[in-house]
Amino acid sequence: MGEQVLPQNTAVRSPRTARTTVLTFASVLCGAALAFGTTLFVGNQVGETGAGMFFQIMAFFSIASVFVTFGADTGLVRTLAAQKALGAATQLKRTTAIAALPVLALACLTGAALWLSAEALETWSGLAGLSDVIRAISPLLVPAALMNLGFGAMRGMGQVAGFSAIQNVLLPSTRFAAVAAAIMLGGTLLQLAASWAWPVLLAAALAGGAAWLAIEKFNRSAPVRPVAEPSAPPASPAKQFWGFSSARGFSALVETLLEWIDVIAVGVFLGPAAAGIYGAVNRCVRLGLMLEHTARLVTGPMLSASLATGRQAQAKLLFSNTAKLLVFCAWPLYLTLAIFAEGVLSLFGAGFAQGAVPMAIISVVMMFAVSAGGVQSMLLMGGKSRWQLGNKLCALAVAVVFNLWLVPAWGLLGAVTAWSLAVLVDCGLATVQVARVMRFGAPVRELIPLAAISLLIFGGGGLLWRVFLEPSLLAAAVHLAVAVPIYVFACVRFSERLGLEALVRQAVQLLRKRQARAA
């Protein structure tokens, strides 16, 4: 399907789309700040040991939630966005049912299995009170699965701002409030776990309702299009959907294990206090990954629609712009975290500064990872979920081997080494596949000026402040107060040479095209 002529009302509607994108980005930043604030509050109130136990409960619930969803949320993003772009309104509810029924059944079975095995898990782990925690949160796997399905359907239907408001504002804010109340009431492990997990009930209700309303609205307003008779019997919709989503489900589970496996390994080998310190490092570094997450939210449905309708040039433009934006936004953050690691971690309490060297190492590694752009989103929206699964399995194998080998010998340094190697393996494989097979290469020449200006202002400037003021929290604050205005001025002044002016212009054009097709 070729490019379509834009309607005359495109210019009128595009500001609303631009506002949606801005609101989405703002809500993701808000969610990152709230999640970071929750971690910060827990660390200061219950110390390294309490924080370590809290992080391990977060890991348990996160892994279980991803397992029961089994990739159906991403399958809904890809399938509903493509069906909407092709005008297949009658298929939307059927696709949603194909996704929801197996997921909710699996969530019920998994929750019941965890409930029945709670005592055995407590005995195996040696953690007193774990059985009560498991019984408190295992029934929540069903609403957690419904929440994830609702999020996927909202994204696939183009309700990105609403999805982001629920996931990144409502859910983390209610969690923060609930965790704060739990700590005031005593801060036991059961209270912390329940307060962090139970807000998914509200999020599930809102996400499921919003997704259903979006599908109903599109069904009422979409024009009826004639459907040509297929030349060959089509594949089963369920087989098509789960052929993609099952691979994504394994991949997402592996991805979640990659996020938490080093924290778990540190807790097993070094104890909950070390897990608390390392968990704080993990949370700080993942602030930067929220930028990549934002890029996935905004560009994922557009990439799926572009690839489904054969608009390769638009897909390449989205991919290129994503790489530029990630370098532009993420490099300053990671440079600041690397240079002022001690000061940043001191926010959590005096004992957390022991994680400064690991945080500096992984921050530098993440700078290279984000430079690859949205390679993960390109694989997913291009239907290459099995490729991504293979990449994640390779990275998980690296993480498991090196965590088992290095954490007992090197402690936190061993954990961050394993994490760094896993990130490089995953990102490296995806980059090669997207560049050589899918023919979407990162704009290296255009990224060099953006990287250079970040290194000069945030890298060189940060090292100077570190020498004069030591790596304290005050030095980090002064550095940011000086560097951010200079960075913004330099980027505006040299926007044409840096490619930012063209990036903004092209982004506006894409938003106008997207809104025109939605109209």
Image: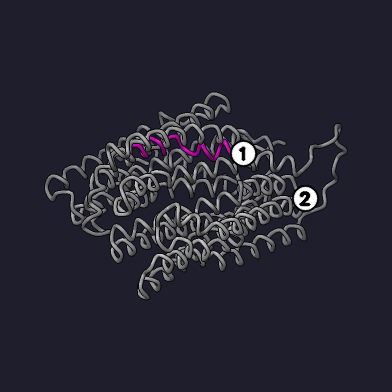
In the rendered image of this protein, does residue 230 appear above or below residue 271?
A: above
Q: Which residue is drawn at 25% across and 49% down?
A: 483
Observer-side mark, 1 or 2, equals: 1
Q: Mark 1 highlights which residue?
A: 247
Q: What kind of residue is marked 2? A: Gln
Q: Which mark is residue 91?
A: 2
Element marked by disc 1: helix
In the rendered image of this protein, does residue 9 appear above or below residue 487?
A: below
- The single residue placed furthest to the left in the displayed view is 468
Residue 379 within the segment the image draws in magenta: yes
Q: Residue 309 vs residue 499: left or right? A: right
Which image quadrant for residue 417?
A: top left
429 or 3, which is in the foreground? 429
Q: Position of residue 293 (x, y in %)?
A: 48, 48
- The single residue placed furthest to the bottom in the displayed view is 185
Cα distance between the residues tagged 1 and 2: 22 Å
Q: Residue 319 vs residue 353: left or right? A: right
Residue 490 in view: yes
Q: How crowded is mark 1: few (under 14 residues within 10 Å), some or many (20 or more)?
A: many
Specify start and end residues of the magenta stretch as a single range: 365-382
